[in-house]
Image: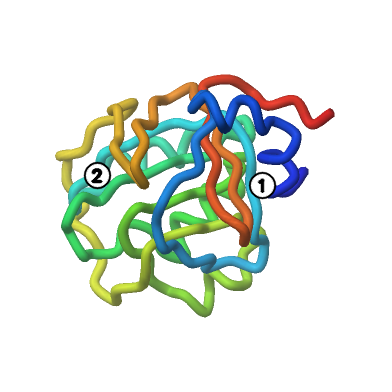
């Protein structure tokens, strides 16, 4: 994947017009792979992970799952769900919230980006919304958008960005 800095340079006109957005925030990588890019699926979870479990049990087709935890501090993703996401072909997971099992996540070949870590797991009950419009990092994210992330930052586009 081309780095986000190079993407922004290559598509400077789209960044200037706002068609490509650089998201604001302080997220950390919890995985050995520290970049992802792809079409996104969104989930508003708010401390409940039943919908997350259902989504990660389905084929990911290289998509990036973006999860908004709201203000709930409980971890939405840990070792077991990350391993399931990898097995089912998800290209990465970005949690606007917390994860757990950090040592184990570091050994899984699935890019995981999150705000932080919290040892308590989320509730295994319904309460989330799949394909919700999320407000994260100063932008609105919808399923079908394209997200690119690495150690330089997170870039959002409504369409796939060509690398050349």
Q: Residue at x 17, y 56 (%)?
A: 71
Whether residue 72 is visible here, answered yes or no, is yes
* Residue contact between numbered discs 2 and 1, judged by CB atoms under 8 Å: no
Q: Earlier in the sequence, mark 2 or mark 1?
A: 1
Whether residue 60 is visible here, answered yes or no, is no
Horizontal and vertical percent position of residue 115: 37, 63
Horizontal and vertical percent position of residue 103: 52, 79
Horizontal and vertical percent position of residue 61: 62, 30
Q: Residue at x 55, y 41 (%)?
A: 155
Q: CA distance from mark 2 to mark 1?
A: 27 Å
* Quadrant occupied by the N terminus: top right
Image position of 139 (left or right of 33) = left
Indicate which disc residue 94 carries.
none
Horizontal and vertical percent position of residue 101: 43, 74
Q: Residue at x 22, y 64 (%)?
A: 74
**Of 9 and 4, the residue lying toward us:** 9
* Quadrant occupied by the C terminus: top right
Examine the image and state in which quarter residue 129 appears.
top left
**Of 135 and 33, the residue lying toward us:** 135
Estimate how packed mark 2 is, as few (under 14), some (14 to 19) or many (20 or more) residues with alpha carbons within 10 Å.
Answer: many
Residue 66 drawn above or below residue 109: above
Image position of 32 (left or right of 105) = right
Figure colour scheme: rainbow
Indicate which disc residue 45 carries.
2
Q: Which residue is mark 1?
A: 4
Estimate how packed mark 1 is, as few (under 14), some (14 to 19) or many (20 or more) residues with alpha carbons within 10 Å.
Answer: many
Residue 126 drawn above or below residue 81: above
């Amino acid at each position: 994947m081309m780095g986000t800095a190079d993407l922004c340079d290559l598509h400077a006109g789209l960044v200037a017009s706002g068609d490509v957005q650089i998201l604001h925030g302080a997220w950390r990588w919890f995985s050995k792979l520290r970049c992802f890019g792809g079409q996104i699926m969104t989930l508003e979870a708010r401390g409940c992970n039943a919908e997350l479990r259902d989504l990660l049990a389905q084929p990911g087709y290289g998509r990036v799952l973006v999860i908004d935890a709201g203000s709930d501090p409980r971890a939405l993703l840990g070792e077991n769900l990350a391993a399931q996401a990898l097995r089912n072909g998800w290209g990465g997971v970005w949690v606007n919230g917390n994860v757990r099992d950090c040592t184990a996540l570091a050994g899984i070949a699935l890019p995981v980006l999150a705000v932080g870590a919290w040892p308590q797991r989320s509730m295994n009950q319904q309460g989330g919304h799949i394909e919700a419009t999320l407000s994260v990092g100063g932008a609105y994210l919808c399923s079908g958008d394209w997200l690119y992330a690495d150690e330089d930052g997170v870039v959002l586009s409504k369409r796939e960005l060509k690398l050349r």
